[in-house]
Image: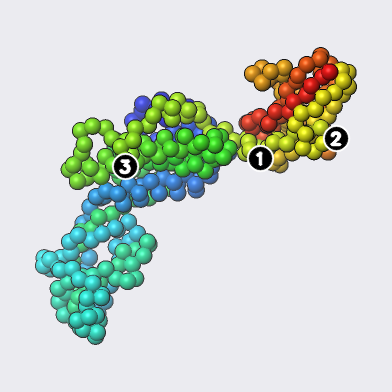
Amino acid sequence: MNVTNFKARVETWADIRAIFWEIMQDSEAAQQFFTETQITNWANKALREMATATIPLEVRATFSTVSESPLYGLGSRAMKIFRLEIDNWRLGVTSEDKLFKSDRNWRTIGGDPKAYYISQFTDSDDLVFGLYPEPRSVLDGIVYYRAKPPTVSSSTDTSRLQVPSWAVWGVLYSMLSDAYLAEGRRHEKTNSSYKYYKMLFNDIVDRLAARSRAKLNKAWVYGSKGTRPNYGIRMSLPNMIQAGPDAPENFGDTVSRTTSATATAIAIAAGTGFSLYWDEGAADVDHFSVYRGKAKTNMQPFATLATTFDPTADGWTDTTATDVGLYYFQVTATNTMGYESWKSDYFTLTVT
């Protein structure tokens, strides 16, 4: 099912998860293709990228200074301080490098703070700022900063995502692009779905950035380079991710007869049986299927081989190809969840 078929209002993490699982033809209980941890990380990655590319949420927080304690943390959501006040006095902005150049003993200076700086102890888990001079008494402070939206998790299913309601779809688009990229080798070699959903995500980020700066193009813009999703990309989207027991390019590429490990075409006399051998592939194979036809455009299921069948050692024997002419064979593997891999390369048989 394509995401464009959904018209419902989407605002919460529960809404996003439900649609994602449905598109993937999966569920939170089964988690056949992706884990809860994966999709949560993808959602938080999207929120982080949206915040980084725009002017995100603005937060006002109060704090009290502690005597002889110059450093204070704002947590992992904080991105950038744009105003800081102590006792209703707006502080200037400086840096540790500037302070050191002016006085190498600057850390020992105390008094009423006149400036703030971003500490070298700042990392992705905590934005740490310092006050200069170092406070020597309890003072009331207010800090204004830009912050990333709160992260999502399985414990916040009903939480509304803190982005504009029209931009919530961007989180889903980014998750889908990451999902199709992760499974690209299984379902399509060109990754057109990844490109499509990434393009939709980039468009929302561009529009979000423009709105946050009060500059929005009147025309709808696709992606940072203004490239519209072309008809070919949109029409080539698969309905869902379908994962076989192994990637198509790694399963069944070599289908051979007993007499030659690399042969892909042989000739036999009418009434003579022959055997096909191929790679077994992944361990979760439920059964194999053999397709046969007189033309590549008319391949029909011909035989189903149970789990106990070993295609590498046993081979599959056909004694019914007795009509003179050309035959084509392909094999597939179906995993325990019922998903069939792509067909193998053709094996050609000529009956004389």
Q: How many marks?
A: 3
Picture disc at residue 224: 3
* Residues marked 2 and 3 touching at CB (< 8 Å): no
Q: Would residue 14 be seen by someone viewing this image from the given angle? A: no
Image point 18% across, 64% down: which residue?
A: 84
Left or right for 113, reference 156: left
Looking at the image, is mark 3 or mark 1 earlier in the sequence? Answer: 3
- At mark 3, the secondary structure is loop
Q: Is residue 78 left or right of residue 301?
A: left
Amino acid type, label 3? Ser
| Number of the label disc, if any, that sits on residue 259 | 2
Question: Split into 4 quadrants, where in the image is the C terminus?
Answer: top right
Among the two numbered marks 2 and 3 on one chain, the one whose residue lies closer to the N terminus: 3
* Residue occupying image coordinates x 40% and y 39%: 198
Q: Is residue 346 above or below residue 50?
A: above
Label for residue 338?
none
> Considering only vertical position in the picture, is 27 above or below 147?
above
- Seen from the viewer's position, the closer of residues 20 and 195 is 195
Q: Pointer 1: what residue?
A: 250
Circle nearer the N terminus (1, 2): 1
- In percent of width and height, residue 267 lies at 82, 24
| Residue 230 visible (yes or no) | yes
Front residue of this view, candidates 200 and 160: 200
